[in-house]
Every structure is written in structure tokens, then in C-alpha cells.
Amino acid sequence: MCKAKKTQSEIANAIGVSQSTISRELSRNRVEGVYTHGRAFMRTYLRLLLKPKRYLIGENEADILETFLKKKWSPETISSVCFDKKISHQTIYNYIERERQLGETLYRYLFFKKRRKKYGIKDYRGQIRNRVIIENRPEIVAERSRFGDWEGDLIMGKNHKGAILTLVERRSKYLCATYLSGKDAKATKNGVIKLLRGMNVKTITFDNGKEFAYHEDISKKLRSEIYFAHPYTSYERGLNEYTNRLLRQYFPKGMDLRKATERELKFALNEINSRPRKSLNWKSPSDYLHELKCAAP
């Protein structure tokens, strides 16, 4: 029909496909403006030979997938680190969904981000004396180009009984944490000093909880600057919020943290700090922190 000077529309109607299909076929397989079925077949065959092999999830891959899902790794992390992206994260999600429909439970290991917007909420928690708001924080902190800028918060146990103080370093994503008896300002102060004593601490950014009321003592003891985010603006401490959600995989809401053990917390910290991160070029916070220390003059 091409030799007979038929239009693409006429060819499409005769074959029973769309005109765009005919257009793509001709544009891909014409040689010097001439279309022949023999050359078209050979060009298509060569493209199939050169097409990257599609990797599927077999028994060995499924074992690896289950192992690292149980370690709380995301499908994107598993795809990049374990399979060198030969099995895409979308393929992994599809596999998990098929397994779920068959009654399997791999989906329970997925980490979902949940966001809740708050509008027009007034802060009734009172003001912390002499606090310095985040606008006054040096711009270099937002760049994450240096080591020593930290974000801090608490995650609470059931009925606000027991808490875990979390401190995460902005550049390396390295997490430090310790148990507290509750939202007590003095205990929080001692916990921060205990965790960061001997560390490089240039700044710390807290939320507006009254547990950080002794920020001036912390600043003096650690020789660092303390800043506070605005009320109900968790995105201003986004790394800390995200890392707390990682920790919640091991200490879910509703858990009585008074019954948690130091061994459990140490295990969770090791798992999180040894987990590869996309933002660190698939290095773990522990490895990245080690490299920073080795590179330091």
C-alpha cells in the first residue's frame, strides 16, 4: 500500500489499527524514505536483541526482598542497593500487591508517609523564655553543607508515660536517641547533653515543647546555638520528623515506652543508621558519618 501511494489513514483502515500505529511503524523502519517489510522485520528483530533484559522476582530475589523489607528498607532502597535497579521499585511494589491479594503479609513491612495539615490552630502551650526563632538561624544550616547542625524532639509513649529523645544530624542523617521518664524539662536537658557531649554541635533546632525550656543551659554546656521552629510547622524540622517516623516502626504509637529496653532502642538505632539513604547516594548514615570524620582536618 505504501508503494501504491496509499495514505496512512487508508492503510490503518485496511489493517485495522490506528493511524498513529502506522505512523510509528513507518518512522521507525523506513530507510532513506523507503519502507520494505524485509528491512522492517530485521530492524525490529535487532531492537529486540538489544533491548535490556527484563528482570523478574524469582525465588532468590523474593528471599532478598523479604529479608530487607523486614529490616524496614523501602522498595526504592532495595531496588538500588540490592538489585542495582535491575528490578525497579515499581516492580517490587507490584509484586508485594500481588502477594497481598494472595493473602501474604509482605505489605505490612512497607513504610507509609502520612501527612496531616493543620489550619488556624493557635498555640496554647505558652512561650519558652529567651527562645530564638528559626528565622535567626544561619543560612548555612539550611544548605546542609557542614556537619554539626542537629534537630531534636521527643516521641511519646502511651498516655504520655515514657518518652524517647531523638537528635538527628542534618548532613549525615545520623540519629542519636535515649529514653526519658516523660516530658520533663530537666530530664530532657540532661538527655541532650548526654547524647551530644563530645560531638560536633554548632546548632540545634527544637520544636516548641516546654520540655526544651532549659535550652540556655544546653547551649552553654554544649557551646552551641539553639533555635526554635514555629508552632505546628513540622516541615521546619522535616528531617527530625521523618526520622521519628522511622523510629516509630520499632516503637509504634500506643506502646508503653516505660517497658521498652535499652537493647531494643540500640537495635533500632543500629538498623536506622545502617540503612542506605537515597539522599546520601545510597550510603548509610553510619558510613557517611565515618567518611566525614575521616575527611575532617
Image: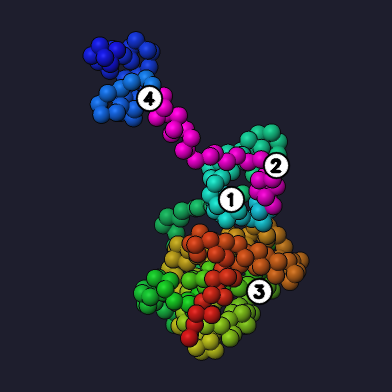
Q: In the image, residue 286 lies at what x, y percent?
A: 59, 71
Real-space Cα distance between discs 1 and 4? Answer: 35 Å
Pick the residue in front: 219 or 150. Answer: 150
Which residue carries the number 1 mark?
Answer: 83
Q: Residues within 10 Å of mark 2 (few under 14, many from 20)?
A: few
Q: Residues within 10 Å of mark 4 (few under 14, many from 20)?
A: some
The residue under label 2 is which amino acid type?
Glu
**Which residue occupies 52% across, 83% down?**
200
The circle drawn on residue 40 is 4
The residue under label 1 is which amino acid type?
Phe
Residue 109 colored in magenta in the image: no
Tell me: residue 69, above or below residue 93.
below
Q: Tell me, yes or no, whether the two marked residues, 3 and 2, touch with CB atoms within 8 Å.
A: no
* Quadrant for the N terminus in the image: top left
Real-space Cα distance between discs 4 and 2? Answer: 38 Å
**Which residue occupies 30% across, 22% down?**
35
Residue mark closest to the camera, 3 vs 1: 1
Secondary element at image label 4: helix
State the extent of the magenta-drawn residues as a range: 39-67
Q: Earlier in the sequence, mark 1 or mark 4?
A: 4
Pick the residue in front: 208 or 72. Answer: 72
Q: How is the image coloured?
A: rainbow
Q: Is residue 60 left or right of residue 284?
A: right
Real-space Cα distance between discs 3 and 2? Answer: 40 Å
